Each structure stands twice: as structure tokens, then as C-alpha cells.
Amino acid sequence: VEAPDFLLRSPSGGKHNFEELHGEKMTIILFWATWSRKSEVALSRVEELYSKYRDQGLEVIAINAEGQEISSATEDVILETSRRLPSPR
């Protein structure tokens, strides 16, 4: 199923639309939240999949779903969570 285009802001402040981020073969879109322990499990599993299949074109977009407006304190928690997880690269 083809997802509609949307705009994302990266933790570094850059803006990217979905059209430029998704892969040619398959893209996993994962919505997560810092308050959900299941989110960390899901993020870890998706990172494992990405490590295994990235050379075959898999892309992953993890979207934090805390809210429409994110405070700097919440942004710090989001960054801390993403840094705590092992990097597939």
C-alpha cells in the first residue's frame, strides 16, 4: 500500500518529506512514544530487520507520536531514547 506524502522534522531540525525518505523496495513506518515500553521493543526489532535487509533496499522511518507540538524537555527524552538503542550502522 502506498502511503501519502507527509512532512517530518528530524531530531537535528531538518525537514524531510516522505517522498524523499522512502525506499524503492519497502519502507517500514513505525510510530512510537517514549511513554510506551512496547515502543522500545518495537524500535529494537525494526532495527534488527533494518540491519538484516538494508542492503536489499529496506528503509525505516520511526515517527515519534508524542504530540503535534513537542517541548524541548520531551525532545530531550526522545533523543535519549534513540541514543540508548543500538545503532544498526
Image: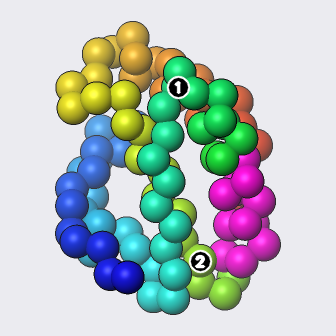
Query: In the figure, is residue 5 to the left or right of 2?
Result: left
Q: Nearer the viewer, residue 62 or 79?
A: 62
> Is residue 12 among the parts visible in the rendering?
no
Examine the image and state in which quarter residue 6 appears. bottom left
Q: How is the image coloured?
A: rainbow
What residue appears at the point 27 percent right and 51 percent down from the top-left corner?
A: 8
Which of the 4 image quadrants contains residue 86? top right
Circles 2 and 1, Cβ within 8 Å, touching? The answer is no
Q: Nearer the viewer, mark 2 or mark 1?
A: 1
Q: If the image is split into quadrants, where does the C terminus sit?
A: bottom right
Which labelled disc corresponds to residue 16? none
What residue appears at the point 65 percent right and 35 percent down from the top-left corner? 38
Residue position for label 2: 58
**Which of the labelled discs sits on residue 34, or is there none?**
1
Which quadrant, please, contains the N terminus?
bottom left
Q: Position of residue 58 (x, y in %)?
A: 59, 77
Give the crowd class for mark 2: few <14, some 14-19, many >=20 residues within 10 Å.
some
- Identify whether 41 is placed above or below 3: above
Report helix, strand or loop for mark 2: strand
* Distance in Å between CA atoms under marks 2 and 1: 24 Å
SS type, badge 1: loop
Residue type (three-letter) at the residue carrying disc 2: Leu
**Image coords of residue 41 (percent x, y):** 71, 41
- Picture quadrant where residue 75 is located: top left
Give above or below for 21 relative to 62. Answer: below
Residue 22 on the magenta segment: no
State which region is magenta.
44-54
Which residue is found at the position 69% from the left and 82% from the top?
55
